[in-house]
Amino acid sequence: MIQKYLAGRLKIETVAIAIPNLMPAKIKISHLTDFHYDGKRLSDRLLKQAIAASNQWEPDLVVLTGDYVTDDPQPITQLAYFLKHLESRYGIYAVLGNHDLHHMYSRSLITETLQGIGIRTLWNEALYPLSHSNLQLVGMPDYWDRAFDAAKVMGQVDPQQPCLVLSHNPDSVLEFSGHPVTLQLSGHTHGGQIVIPGMGPVLAKMSDWRPPRWLLHSLPSDRANCHKVVKHWEWAEGLHQVGHQQLYVNRGLGTYMPGRFNCPPEVTWLELYSSATTTLPRNTA
Ligand SMILES: [Fe+2]
């Protein structure tokens, strides 16, 4: 019940992104992230709304960018009961977040449970998710996991074709700076959760703040470590140009205490379109 007041209302963000040489000329993607399904941080009501919103977009692909649980991975079983209602024309792909790796068995349990409902979890893998498209999809382990290996996975990618990366932590975009990545989709930040109009996420202003030792012991570990969440709070949400790449950061669905302000939970409706189609001169004879 408390999530209803802490999280606020779901917001659908519609984002059109130009992808050079994309075939076909338009691909619809639904992006969901950061569920934190643990009985405290995401209500079943909001989860159902998010799944309905995703289905309403009638996406070609659905992508999930991690943090299905918070600590104990067991709730993934109940979460899967809801996620199996996600609809996609050509498949549902997932990557794991830092919270999906807290225990030795977390990765296998979450991966196998998602697999059981037809969701493929990518771990340093590249593939073509649409048989009629040149779009390549790369899925990464969590950035803080030692298995994260951008160079290895990019060796599997055709540099001449568009490449979409799924990577939970937006800081990881810098690992692809020398590689032909067109767009990265991330979550992890929850948008900062508390956003002051005209100022941005409060956490961005606190990124250099270290709780004093006496306070460190009395704070829950997740808040005591809030300054460690990301280095680049300037990418806390929305679309950014980082070098030659585009980065989109979804605010996610789950909510930590003390809640959200001016930072609603999000489902993203992405429309990738071939930039070649928009740069053609108009009214040419
Ligand atoms: Fe998260």
Image (cartoon, grey):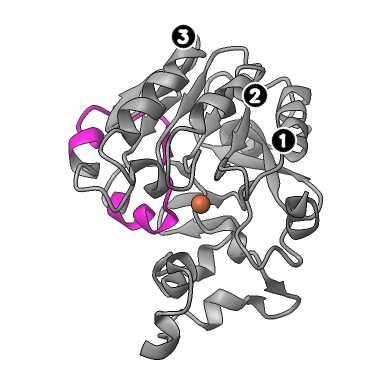
Residue 263 appears at what percent x and percent y? 71, 61
Vertical placement of 284 versus 180: above or below?
above
Whole-angstrom CA distance, mark 1 to mark 2, is 8 Å
Amino acid at pointer 2: Phe
Residue appearing at x 52%, y 59% in the figure: 189
Amino acid at pointer 3: Ser
Q: Nearer the viewer, mark 2 or mark 3?
A: 2
User: In this picture, which residue range is highlighted in magenta?
Assistant: 152-176
Q: Is mark 1 within 8 Å of ligand 1?
A: no
Mark 2 neighbour class, 10 Å CA radius: few under 14, some 14 to 19, many 20 or more = some
Q: Secondary structure at mark 3?
A: loop
Contact between labelled residues 3 and 2, with CB atoms less than 8 Å apart: no
Residue 251 appears at what percent x and percent y? 62, 53
Residue appearing at x 78%, y 48% in the figure: 1
Query: Disc 1 designates what residue?
Result: 44
Quick check: is 172 in the magenta stretch?
yes
Vertical placement of 222 versus 135: above or below?
below
Indicate which disc residue 131 carries: 3
Contact between labelled residues 2 and 1, with CB atoms less than 8 Å apart: yes
Quick check: is 238 in the magenta stretch?
no
Amino acid at pointer 1: Asp
Vertical placement of 101 versus 242: above or below?
above
In the drawing, does residue 8 fall left or right of residue 215?
right
Q: Secondary structure at mark 1?
A: helix
Query: Disc 2 designates what residue?
Result: 82
Q: Quadrant of residue 109?
A: top left
Q: Which mark is first along the chain, 3 or 1? A: 1
Q: For this rendering, which residue is in front, 77 or 280? A: 77
Q: Which mark is first along the chain, 2 or 1? A: 1
Q: Nearer the viewer, mark 1 or mark 3?
A: 1
